[in-house]
Image (cartoon, rainbow, N blue to C red):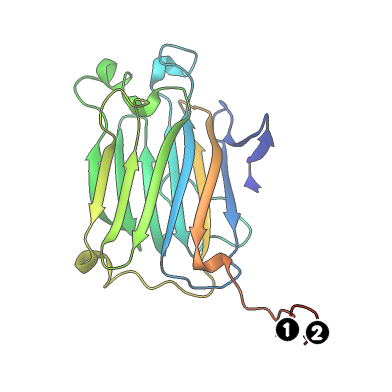
Amino acid sequence: LYGNATIGGGALHLTERHEGQLGSYAIALRTPGAPFFSARLSVMLGTAVGSADSAGAGGEGLAFCYGELPPDAPFGEMGVPEGLCVRLRTYTHLTMEASCNGTVLASQPMGGGTFAQRSGSPLRSGAFKPLDVARVPGDGLRVAFDADGGADEAVTLHVPEEVLAPLYAPAPTWRFGVGARAGTTPAAHQVDALLLTSAGFVGEAGVGLRGANNAQQFSA
């Protein structure tokens, strides 16, 4: 845990609804530099629209990253300069972005119109909603965010392999992490039910093995 991040009520609180907060959480790998992974996490971006979160206009957002995370400092909604990040940007941006090494490779708007209409964006729903991120062999990066809780199709991003591969090169020091920032119109950012699947969590180890040809006499 870094910055203002805490654990409370069974969830990871990256920021509370206080101006200027910044918090992140990092996970080290057992096998460094693994290239492929899938992740599902439930994210909550602020409280209900019309609450004290500046009538739903709070920010600044949250980022899920696999990359060179700061060794002893938090990161926010823009992620990190070296690595693969999915950004959920709130405040007046209201976009979901995929970036690698700071370059935005795909973007999907999550709201539009006037500022008042933007305050009703699904990004500011005030409830936990699933975010799925997968780095797939031969298929690049796929992201899905069920912003409205299943009422409509999830918002999706796809970065093709030929676009991602020239930029994406996991280093042994890369880690997974999630970070958020609360700006001058702050909002709470929380994460729950984080599930990561990657060869990076599998390592080599010796195990004992015994065999028998008659189920009675064993040899090591």
The percent coordinates of residue 103 (x first, y second) are 29, 59
The residue pinned by badge 1 equals: 212
Q: Amino acid at mark 1?
A: Ala
Q: Secondary structure at mark 2?
A: loop
**Residue placed furthest toward the top:** 50
Q: Is residue 161 above or below residue 177?
A: below
Residue at screen point 54% across, 44% down: 194
Q: Which mark is residue 217?
A: 2
Q: Quadrant of residue 10?
A: top right
Residue at screen point 38% across, 59% down: 84
Q: Amino acid at mark 2?
A: Gln
The percent coordinates of residue 112 (x first, y second) are 21, 26
Q: Which mark is residue 71?
A: none
Mark 2 and mark 1 residues within 8 Å of each other at the beta carbon: yes
Q: Is residue 210 left or right of residue 197?
A: right
Q: Pick whichever of labels 2 and 1 is earlier in the sequence.
A: 1
Q: CA distance from mark 2 to mark 1?
A: 6 Å
In the rendered picture of this protein, how many numbered marks are placed on residues?
A: 2
Q: Quadrant of residue 17?
A: top right
The percent coordinates of residue 153 (x first, y second) are 25, 31
Q: Secondary structure at mark 1?
A: strand
**Residue placed furthest toward the bottom:** 219
